[in-house]
Amino acid sequence: MKQAWLLSAFCLVISVSGLPTADCETIDLGPSQISLDLASIGDYSVEKKSTSTADHREKGVDFTYAIYPATITAEETSGQVLVEVYEMSESMPLDAAISWKDTVTGLEHCIEQSELVPRRAAIQTEPYQINGHEGILAKIDEGDSNPMYVAAYSPDQTDGSGTIVCIVGSTFSWQTTKAIFDSIEARTA
């Protein structure tokens, strides 16, 4: 009898531990589902914005891409988490310089061109692991007391190239932002 009770309790613990927490938000953006643990920001609202498309015709590289944005706004502060998913029409190099003249990588270029980053802002980047993938972390300093942090990676990246780029920005403190960035999980269709 005791063994059956222990086995039942063990199975219950195992099944409950696999459930997502109430503060884990999953947002469908284009070809991806982006999951973030937002427990540290309190109550919040999610606003999915209009999708936009563009043609990239620069330096002999031609492709089409779509941008799927969303904004998560904390209700008790002015803090925000901004999410953009880029879907490119073909796999593009993301970890190498985009040209011999422009030494930024494809991921850095996506961050610079995103709506998350103010034009001409000072950006510092460094490698950053996101959901088991090589990505980058950018710190955008506009002279405010709190810089903005942006993380980017490609969940479908193979051999340095990918068709999907997930970009997440945060205006929260680094401690709160790091917890959010460490929870990023993008699943592609």
Image: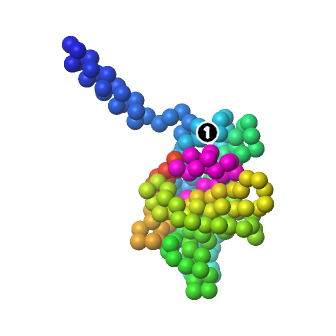
* Magenta part of the chain: 164-182
Q: Is residue 107 above or below residue 18?
A: below
Residue 148 screen position, x and y as percent: 69, 56
Picture coordinates of residue 158, whole percent (x, y): 41, 68
Residue labelled with disc 1: 40
Residue drawn at 57 percent across, 83 percent down: 99
Q: Position of residue 184 (x, y in %)?
A: 52, 50
As helix, strand or loop, the secondary structure at mark 1 comes to helix
- Above or below residue 31? Residue 103 is below
Check residue 21 for magenta coloring: no
Give residue 7's position: percent from left, percent from top: 25, 23
Q: Mark 1: which amino acid?
A: Ser
Q: Quadrant of residue 176?
A: top right
Q: Nearer the viewer, residue 6 or 62?
A: 6
Q: How many marks?
A: 1
Instruction: Look at the image and tell me whether residue 52 can be seen.
Output: no
Mark 1, residues whose alpha carbon is within 10 Å: few (<14), some, or many (≥20)? some
Q: Which residue is pictured at 50% across the width and 34% down the height? A: 21
Q: Give left or right: position of 16 versus 98.
A: left
Question: Is residue 177 visible to us here?
Answer: yes
The answer to whether residue 110 is above or below residue 181 is below
Specify the quadrant that holds the C terminus. Answer: bottom left
Q: Nearer the viewer, residue 148 or 45?
A: 148
- Please name the residue shown 73% across and 62% down the image: 141
Question: Which corner quadrant of the image does residue 132 belong to?
Answer: bottom left
